[in-house]
């Protein structure tokens, strides 16, 4: 009888551990889906790849992107910043944007797919 109780207890712990691992896995999947949503726009993908080369300010990004207005580029930067893929650095009148560690990792993946 004690062996049956021990097996049931072990089985219960195993189920709880598996459920916790599954919940963490689901949370990771949701986090990755949210990151991919951040770069689902072609302009944001371009910004991500441009910033993987070097940090830039809005004016530089507008020039590189060609057809994008400054407000549009600023909006894309805000979304990328909200997703914690980029971070600003203030220098004089300008904010220079650079990739975060997560942004660099995502840029490598995007570059390998595009490249």
Image: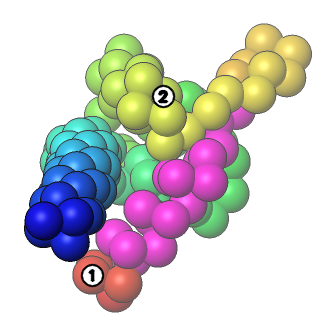
Disc 2 target residue: 81
Q: What is the number of the mark on residue 77? A: none
Magenta region's main secondary structure? helix
Q: Does any portion of residue 105 appear in the rendered image?
A: yes
Q: Residue at x 62, y 54 (%)?
A: 101
Q: How many marks?
A: 2
The picture places residue 111, in percent across and down from the top left corner, at 39, 76
Which region shows up in magenta? 96-111
Residue 105 forms part of the magenta stretch: yes
**In the image, residue 16 above or below residue 105:** above
Q: Residue at x 55, y 39 (%)?
A: 86
Q: Is 91 left or right of 18, judged from the image as shown?
A: right
The picture places residue 23, in percent across and down from the top left corner, at 22, 47
- Mark 2 or 1, nearer chain start: 2
**In the image, residue 18 above or below residue 30:** below
SS type, badge 1: helix
Q: Is 101 left or right of 70, judged from the image as shown?
A: right
Which image quadrant is residue 60 in? top right
Which image quadrant is residue 18 in? bottom left
Q: Is 77 left or right of 19, judged from the image as shown?
A: right
**In the image, residue 25 above or below residue 109:** above
Disc 1 target residue: 113
The picture places residue 71, in percent across and down from the top left corner, at 36, 15
Alpha carbons under labels 2 and 1: distance apart: 23 Å
In this view, the residue in front, 83 or 44, is 83
In this view, the residue in front, 114 or 58, is 114
Q: Residues within 10 Å of mark 2 (few under 14, many from 20)?
A: some
Q: Residue furthest front?
A: 1
Q: Does any portion of residue 36 appear in the rendered image?
A: no
Residue 101 forms part of the magenta stretch: yes
The picture places residue 39, in percent across and down from the top left corner, at 27, 47
SS type, badge 2: helix
């Amino acid at each position: 009888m004690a062996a049956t109780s021990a097996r049931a207890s072990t089985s219960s712990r195993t189920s709880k551990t598996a459920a916790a691992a599954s919940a963490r896995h689901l949370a990771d999947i949701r986090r990755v889906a949210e990151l991919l949503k951040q770069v689902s726009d072609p302009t944001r993908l371009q910004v991500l790849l441009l910033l993987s080369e070097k940090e830039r300010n809005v004016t530089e990004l507008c020039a590189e992107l060609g057809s994008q207005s400054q407000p549009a580029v600023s909006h894309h930067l805000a979304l990328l910043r909200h997703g914690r893929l980029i971070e600003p650095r203030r220098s004089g009148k300008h904010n220079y944007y650079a990739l975060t560690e997560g942004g660099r990792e995502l840029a490598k993946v995007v570059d390998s797919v595009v490249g």
